[in-house]
Image: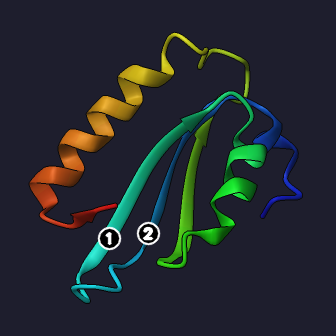
């Protein structure tokens, strides 16, 4: 996944897995100017087994849009009752 060219762009990502303390589904929602670099930094978060990324194909998702996406994703995650790490 890290070899994908799209991950050199800014975006929002969601790491999915299982909370090691509770055994419940867990999610971590983040943002980055270079998604690839940030995902590499998260390699030590042991819970995640899947990653979902949102980047712009045509540069229409800018640094100013990203916090909006992250907040919206976080609100939906809380409603799902998954653990937030």
Of 60 and 63, which appears nearest the observer? 63
Q: What residue sits 35% from the left and 86% below the top?
A: 20
Q: Residues within 10 Å of mark 2 (few under 14, many from 20)?
A: many
User: Label 2's element?
Assistant: strand
Look at the picture and state if 34 lies above or below 60.
Answer: below
Which colouring convention does the figure follow?
A: rainbow
Q: Quadrant of residue 84?
A: bottom left
Residue 64 placement, left or right of 60? left
Q: CA distance from mark 1 to mark 2?
A: 6 Å
Q: What residue sits 28% from the left and 77% below the top?
A: 25
Would you say the residues marked 1 and 2 are in contact, meaning their CB atoms lie under 8 Å apart? Answer: yes
Residue 43 placement, left or right of 1? left
Look at the picture and state if 71 lies above or below 79.
Answer: above
What residue would you read off at disc 1? 26
Look at the picture and state if 60 lies above or below 73.
Answer: above
Q: How many marks?
A: 2
Of 69 and 30, which appears nearest the observer? 30
Give percent across and percent down for residue 3: 89, 58
Give percent across and percent down for residue 53: 58, 49
Q: Residues within 10 Å of mark 1 (few under 14, many from 20)?
A: many
Give percent across and percent down for residue 37: 77, 45
User: Label 1's element?
Assistant: strand
Q: Quadrant of the N terminus?
A: bottom right
Q: What residue sits 21% from the left and 85% below the top?
A: 22
Give percent across and percent down for residue 48: 51, 74
Residue 16 numbered mark, or none: 2
Residue at the top extreme?
Answer: 64
Q: Quadrant of residue 80?
A: bottom left
Of 2 and 37, which appears nearest the observer? 37
């Amino acid at each position: 996944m890290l070899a994908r060219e799209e991950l050199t762009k800014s975006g929002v990502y969601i790491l999915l897995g299982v909370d090691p303390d509770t055994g419940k589904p867990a999610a971590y929602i983040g943002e980055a100017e270079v998604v690839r670099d940030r995902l590499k930094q998260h390699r030590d978060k042991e819970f995640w087994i899947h990653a979902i990324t949102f980047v712009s194909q045509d540069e229409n998702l800018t640094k100013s849009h990203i916090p909006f996406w992250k907040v919206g994703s976080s609100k939906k995650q809380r409603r799902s009752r998954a653990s937030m790490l």
